[in-house]
């Protein structure tokens, strides 16, 4: 076949390859980023990443997740040399789990809400973080022996809060639910909605709380026994479609988050 007669066929072949690439998952991911999709990066562990993944999945925002392929190289590019990070179009790369959650709250009404509900959400976020920090110190060997064992059993709330056991935290959250359930800022009776601290039930604080409670339940299935309000919250939140997506396969992450804390 003469060279000139081959050009139409070569052109058609090239066009076919181009169309195939445009329709490929890789091209779709790149185009989503170009359109301003948020990119969330964390390790495949149920630790500091799932709360943000839950918040992103519930928010309705366009996002994609990634596990670090080369953490040694990536680490130096992060704001605080740690994960998680959220890459955004309007605020750059955001480090720290709680800062990421606060950013998401500003982007979706149901994730933050009006002043009163934002205050509720923020308090839940901080209280859940207190529990997380105790778990982290036990895992890292900074709390050991009787003190570590006492984390699961101590009920004394007359000591310094840095020494609170889990039952104190859960009792405080149980009472906080009752307080929030009386009436929301817009007059909606939360106790009538069931299992919610806020009217949406999926504020960033509730995402953080669920993530922490789930970490606890992975360690002790009956950890919420005796706390009906928290049990109601956990069970309701766990059944949400967006939550199920994150629990089963990480939502928009490349895969599921594995258990991090162990007894």
Image (cartoon, helix red, strand yellow):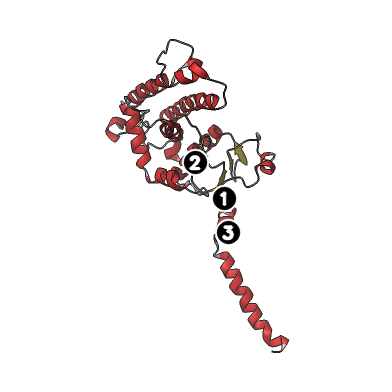
The mark closer to the camera, 2 or 1, is: 2
Q: In which quarter of the image is residue 225?
A: top left
Q: Distance between the residues labelled 3 and 1?
A: 16 Å
Residue 97 visible in the displayed image: yes
Q: Which of 217 and 65 is in front in this view?
A: 217
Indicate left or right for 30 with 230 as reference: right
Residue 183, image x and y in percent? 32, 27
Residue position for label 3:
26
Could you tell me which secondary element the residue under label 1 belongs to?
loop
Disc 2, disc 1: CB below 8 Å?
no
Q: Which residue is drawn at 65% across and 39% down?
A: 78
Could you tell me which secondary element the residue under label 2 belongs to?
strand
Q: Earlier in the sequence, mark 2 or mark 1?
A: 1
Residue position for label 1:
36
Residue 108 to residue 1: above or below: above
Q: Earlier in the sequence, mark 3 or mark 1?
A: 3
Disc 3, disc 1: CB below 8 Å?
no
Residue 122, image x and y in percent? 47, 28
């Amino acid at each position: 076949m003469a060279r000139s007669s081959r050009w139409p066929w070569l052109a058609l072949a090239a066009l076919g390859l181009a169309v195939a690439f445009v329709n490929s998952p890789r091209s779709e991911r790149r185009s989503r980023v170009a359109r301003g999709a948020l990119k969330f990066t964390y390790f495949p562990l149920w630790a500091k990443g799932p709360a943000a993944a839950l918040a992103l999945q519930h928010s309705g925002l366009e996002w994609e997740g990634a596990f670090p392929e080369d953490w040694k190289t990536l680490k130096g590019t992060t704001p605080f040399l740690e994960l998680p990070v959220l890459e955004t179009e309007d605020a750059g790369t955001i480090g720290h789990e709680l800062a990421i959650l606060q950013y998401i709250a500003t982007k979706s009404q149901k994730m933050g809400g009006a002043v009163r509900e934002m205050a509720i959400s923020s308090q839940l976020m901080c209280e859940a973080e207190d529990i997380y920090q105790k778990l982290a110190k036990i895992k890292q060997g900074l709390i050991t022996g009787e003190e570590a064992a006492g984390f699961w059993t101590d009920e004394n709330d007359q000591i310094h809060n840095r020494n609170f056991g889990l039952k104190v935290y859960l009792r405080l959250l149980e009472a906080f639910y009752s307080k929030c359930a009386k009436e929301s800022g817009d007059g909606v009776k939360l106790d009538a909605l069931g299992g919610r601290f806020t009217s949406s039930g999926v504020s960033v604080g509730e995402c953080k709380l669920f993530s922490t409670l789930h970490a606890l339940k992975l360690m002790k299935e009956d950890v919420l026994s005796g706390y009906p309000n928290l049990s109601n919250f956990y069970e309701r939140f766990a059944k949400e479609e967006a939550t199920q997506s994150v629990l089963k396969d990480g939502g928009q992450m490349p895969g599921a988050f594995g258990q991090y804390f162990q007894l």
